[in-house]
Amino acid sequence: MAKRIITVFGATGKQGGSVVKKFLEDPKLQPEWSIRGVTRDVSSASAKALTAKGVEMVTANVDDKASLVKALSGSAAAFAMTNYWDKADMDLEIQQGKNLADAAKEAGVQHYIWSSLPNVTKLSGGVLKHVYHFDSKAAVEEYVREIGIPATFFLPGIFMSNFPGGMLRPSPDDGGAYRLRMPFAGDRPISLFDSGNDSGSYVKAIVLRRDELLGKRVLASSGEVTGDEMVATFSRLYPEAGKGAKFEQVTPQAYQAAMQGPDFINEELTENMRLIGEFGYFGGESLEPSLAIVEDKLTSWEDHLKAARAFADLK
């Protein structure tokens, strides 16, 4: 019996790469599925490495629907995503997402898995209306539903990789002690997700439960951890580096003022963090139904910290 094809966009990136790895290696998936990976440059070292493992690597342009139809041709399933940060243009990301959806419908894809996010403007009642990289993906999700593709929606939590050496870093103003500064209280739950390790485990669960999950949203996270707990785990694992480490609540204004990017991106990212504090990353929706479908072990915050390259030399 011929294997079914799953086409994975962003195959050389974190989310897509995790999906490819899972379908290559998992004993439940490997006998049933062949993988087609979509990337910008099939001649890159990362693309060639996947080709060597048996992945059919193809190129397609999210601005060119014909190339997307070709990439999706013959696919039983597809994992699709877009990268807002490539251009930081909400309207462009929505159009790219619609191009992908239209192509999937034209190609007859029977299970379309869209990497989505909550609509923060709606969720917050208009209080937070500048989290464009969430609202754009939510708009595409709405479009996918409108045009009637058989789909499941994968919503990743906040990436753990944002923290080691990034949000959790030494503070020059505090003698080099580590600080995690956020515009919300340290006891607020944060829906953490290791996209590079666990996206594949969630997509595996979605594919294996296709009929049950058509039309549903899957909230991808290994669980909720507070900022205080995140810092406490860091200090326990790295007692020398973690000496004096603290979570500190700052005002949204101070949080935004400390950022180095363009003003509109600083505002967007500050509102993104306010979402966690004021409404909850997923609007207070329980993670339990989504956690229950995953049979693989997910990556905890402690697991992620132990493997973080930024902390490799800490003691």
Image (cartoon, rainbow, N blue to C red):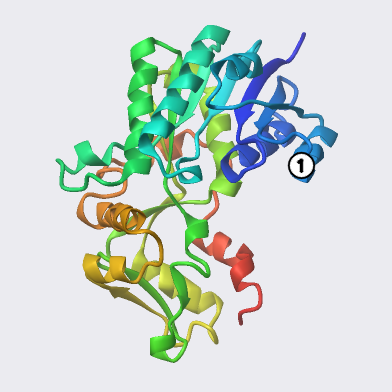
Judging depth in this view, the residue of 260 and 53 nearest the camera is 260
Residue 96 appears in the picture as rendered: yes
State the image coordinates of residue 207 (x, y, percent, origin top left): 55, 24
Closer to the camera in the image, 273 or 302:
273
Residue at image point 60% right, 45% down: 14
Q: Amino acid at mark 1?
A: Ser
Please give the residue where the numbered disc 1 appears in the rendered image.
Answer: 44
Say which residue appears at 53% left-offset and 15% top-offset: 104
| Left-right relation of 96 to 198 | left
33 relative to 303, above or below:
above
Relative to 85, is 14 on the left or the right? right
Across and down, in percent, residue 117 comes to 37, 37
Outermost residue on the right side: it is 52
Residue 54, position as x, y percentages in the image:
81, 29
Image coordinates of residue 302 in percent, x first then y, are 53, 64
Q: Residue at x 35, y 66 (%)?
A: 227
Q: State the SS at label 1.
A: loop
Residue at 68% x, 18% y is 5
Residue 297 visible, this angle: no
Q: Quadrant of residue 208?
A: top right
Quadrant in which the C terminus appears: bottom right
Say few, some or many: other residues with alpha carbon within 10 Å of mark 1 (under 14 / 14 to 19 / 20 or more).
few
